[in-house]
Image: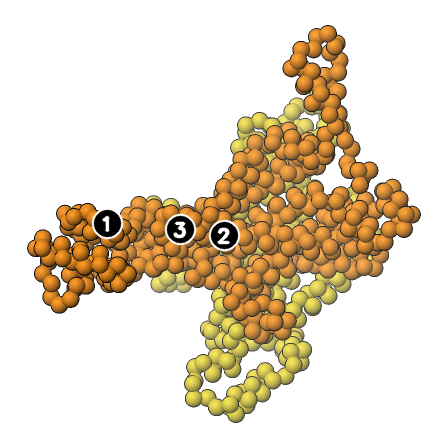
């Protein structure tokens, strides 16, 4: 396999110095410079020169980490993406929401049924302190307490003996929640929905780009390697697909109902219809660029000596394509997949924004904007933040793709 | 050459034909055909009624038979009725096409007017801070989601500054027949500014990067060195020797963008509630308006494919180095 790797490079600029002048440090430098660099280490060293691309990579990694850590973040801030709170709709960023009294009562009832003895203690303490009078049984006092606003509840509980209320105080504290980015039209916390939305948006973006890359690789490799009729048929098809207007066709395809579609109906379970349909539609529409790119690389590669050598040694077409040609198109493929991630994220957002992609209640950055548009005067941040995240992510992905292309393409001159 | 044009035209026609069948098929897969809507509207409907209705509407026939029938009526010039608006599709299309034409055309011109000079400037100052700044601007254009840009512009100009109308095509309630031509124009123009800005910024990125790279290619040629060596003023070298040759590859991109002049921009028009073709496609598909959706999609597809063909042919005429086989 080593014979097919692109040319190795040794740096020679330090060789001119005479040996006597070498201190320990420069010797090490010379050793380092004289070591044969693999293609990927050259690519890496050129890549880190492109500052914007490195910054983009960092941003993407941060987003991915946040998306992966979504359940942790949800646990940490105490919000769940589907928690609705009808009395606290459209809170401004940084405002605090208070659970409605019915939910406060529910929380107290749950607490007293789980910790009967403790609840009884609090009840007795409240009665002896003369704060509340019991009507019938022990839950009643707590229920009355629940009617007051959380600050009062806390103040009264704090006046009681510590050991009896220690279990109840966290319950009361959970009544008020801080919403760093406010709440949406159903009183759901925007921040945690954005975090979970990152999972969907990034997940769909990567899934679509990788599947499309795989299809593009197969189509491009077969067309390029076999040539002739297969090539021209496949390429006419690819050209025609490329020529189609993107959004109208995507809208038509996303509007179909899977129940009526013959093959997909059996392939995709109804529970995942929402996301898988979108991924399918986007994949169908985004493999062409990769296919063209791979085909043109393969066309030149198949004339090279190592392919001839493999052929004379009796390699089958399949093994020539997969073992000898694929490793050589990995680099351009990587660039094209990276750029594909950016455009997939945008198309997912666009379709979800139109109400044809990811459906509520699953949050995605696109469908969070879908509702936000009608409420632009009441809650402008609902519209601004998700879009800003899409912008930041796609711009990072595009810069990453640009940097990779510059680093991989030996002809590129932008330094 | 003629052989090439003939083959490409034939291919385009075949693609249009195949695609119309594909779209027709897709539309039958959408939820809510006419009979399904009737069933929803009338819970007392019997199964005999359903079979009868399905045969009246021809829904019991195989798809290719229905497609053939539909194609026959289209060829006779009968585009059918819109189910939502109860008017012939032909009456609907006219104003939408005109609206879209004005919007997309002005956006295209605005975007070219900004992108081409900036691209040339970036190429001439390659590697400087200015180049990076322009590059960032271009990247922003490519990466900005159109719906978000639209919403932000509405917020800034429509909600906070209150200088431009947030959405619509013209002021509702004005009697345009009573107004002077100029007043009608200014009224419609104020509604067009925001969508125009949105559309323009989205295309600027591509045009800009394309101009820059094509200008860089062209300025690296030997004839530029010759022109400089013979002592021509710098401006003349840039404009007549560099830019003129850089224009050639631009032709393709510009021709391709022309397709949007008739097909419209679905998302931008939807965000601004602008009554154009793009919004019509979206609306008709959402509201199961089958006749309208089919015609709109076909118009869009045909425009795009024909302009693609035109771009290829134009390019071969413009660049004598290219010979088509």
Q: Residues within 10 Å of mark 2 (few under 14, many from 20)?
A: many
Question: A228 or A135, which lies in front?
Answer: A135
Circle 2 chain: A
Q: Are dots 3 and 1 in contact, CB under 8 Å?
A: no
Pointer 2 residue: A199
Q: Are dots 3 and 2 in contact, CB under 8 Å?
A: no
Chain A colour in the picture: orange
Pointer 3 residue: A74
Image quarter hosting the C terminus of chain A: top right
Q: Position of residue B258 (x, y in %)?
A: 61, 52
Mark 3 or mark 1, which has the lower sequence index? 3
Position of residue A384 relative to residue B128, above or below, is below
Pointer 1 residue: A166
Circle 1 chain: A
Position of residue B112 relative to residue B305, above or below, is above
Residue located farthest toward the left when viewing the structure as drawn? A130
Mark 2 or mark 1, which has the lower sequence index? 1
Q: Position of residue B58 (x, y in %)?
A: 60, 84
């Amino acid at each position: 396999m080593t014979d097919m790797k692109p040319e190795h490079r040794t740096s020679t600029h330090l060789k001119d110095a005479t040996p006597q002048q070498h201190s320990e440090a420069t010797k090490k430098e010379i050793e380092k410079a004289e070591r044969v660099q693999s293609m990927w280490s050259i690519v890496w060293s050129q890549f880190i020169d492109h500052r914007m691309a490195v910054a983009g990579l960092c941003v993407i990694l941060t987003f991915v980490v946040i998306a992966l850590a979504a359940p942790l973040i949800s646990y940490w801030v105490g919000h769940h993406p589907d928690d609705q709170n009808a009395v606290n709709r459209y809170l401004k960023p940084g405002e605090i929401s208070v659970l409605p009294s019915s939910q406060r009562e529910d929380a107290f009832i749950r607490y007293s049924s789980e910790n009967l003895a403790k609840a009884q203690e609090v009840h007795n303490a409240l009665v002896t302190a003369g704060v509340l009078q019991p009507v019938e049984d022990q839950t009643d006092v707590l229920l009355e307490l629940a009617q007051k606003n959380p600050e009062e509840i806390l103040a009264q509980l704090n006046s009681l003996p510590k050991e009896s209320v220690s279990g109840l105080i966290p319950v009361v504290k959970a009544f008020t929640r801080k919403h760093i980015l406010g709440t949406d039209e159903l009183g759901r916390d925007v921040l945690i929905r954005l975090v979970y939305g990152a999972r969907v948006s990034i997940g769909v973006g990567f899934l679509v780009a990788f599947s499309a890359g795989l299809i593009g690789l197969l189509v491009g490799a077969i067309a390029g390697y076999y040539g002739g009729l297969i090539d021209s048929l496949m390429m006419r098809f690819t050209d025609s697909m490329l020529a189609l207007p993107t959004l109208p066709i995507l809208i038509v395809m996303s509007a179909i109902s899977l129940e009526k579609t013959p093959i997909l109906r059996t392939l995709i379970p109804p529970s995942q219809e929402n996301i898988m349909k979108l991924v399918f539609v986007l994949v169908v529409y985004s493999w062409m660029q990769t296919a063209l790119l791979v085909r043109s690389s393969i066309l030149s590669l198949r004339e090279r000596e190592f392919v001839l050598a493999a052929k004379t040694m009796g390699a089958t077409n399949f093994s020539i394509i997969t073992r000898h040609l694929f490793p050589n198109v990995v680099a351009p493929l990587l660039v094209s997949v990276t750029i594909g991630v950016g455009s997939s994220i945008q198309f997912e957002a666009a379709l979800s924004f139109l109400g044809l992609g990811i459906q509520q209640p699953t949050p995605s950055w696109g469908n969070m904007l879908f509702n936000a548009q009608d409420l632009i005067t009441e809650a402008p941040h609902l519209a601004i933040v998700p879009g800003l995240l899409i912008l930041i992510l796609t711009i990072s992905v595009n810069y990453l793709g640009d940097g990779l292309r510059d680093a991989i393409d030996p002809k590129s001159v932008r330094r | 050459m003629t052989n090439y044009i003939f083959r490409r035209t034939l291919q385009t026609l075949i693609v249009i034909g195949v695609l119309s069948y594909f779209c027709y098929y897709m539309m039958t897969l959408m939820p809510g055909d006419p009979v399904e809507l009737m069933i929803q509207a009338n819970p007392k409907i019997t199964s005999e009624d359903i079979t009868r209705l399905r045969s009246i509407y021809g829904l019991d026939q195989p798809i290719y038979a229905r497609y053939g029938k539909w194609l026959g009526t289209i060829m006779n010039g009968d585009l059918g009725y819109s189910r939502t608006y109860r008017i012939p599709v032909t009456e609907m299309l006219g104003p939408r096409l005109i609206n879209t034409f004005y919007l997309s055309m002005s956006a295209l011109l605005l975007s070219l007017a900004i992108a081409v000079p900036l691209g040339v400037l970036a190429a001439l100052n390659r590697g400087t801070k200015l180049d990076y700044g322009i590059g960032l601007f271009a990247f922003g254009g490519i990466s900005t989601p159109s719906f978000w840009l639209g919403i932000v512009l509405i917020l800034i100009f429509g909600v906070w500054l209150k200088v431009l109308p947030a959405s619509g095509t013209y002021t509702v309630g004005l009697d345009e027949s009573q107004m002077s031509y100029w007043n009608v124009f200014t009224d419609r123009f104020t509604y067009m500014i925001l969508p125009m800005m949105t559309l323009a910024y989205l295309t600027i990125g591509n045009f800009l990067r394309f101009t820059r790279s094509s200008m860089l290619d062209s300025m690296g040629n030997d004839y530029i060195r010759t022109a400089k060596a013979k002592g021509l003023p710098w401006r003349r070298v840039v404009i007549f020797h560099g830019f003129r040759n850089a224009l050639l590859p631009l032709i393709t991109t510009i021709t391709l963008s022309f397709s949007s002049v008739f097909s419209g921009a679905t998302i931008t028009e939807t965000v601004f509630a602008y009554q154009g073709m793009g919004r019509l496609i979206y609306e008709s598909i959402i509201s199961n308006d089958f006749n309208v959706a089919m015609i709109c999609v076909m118009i869009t597809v045909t425009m795009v494919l024909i302009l693609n063909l035109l771009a290829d042919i134009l390019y071969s005429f413009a660049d004598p180095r290219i010979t088509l086989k």
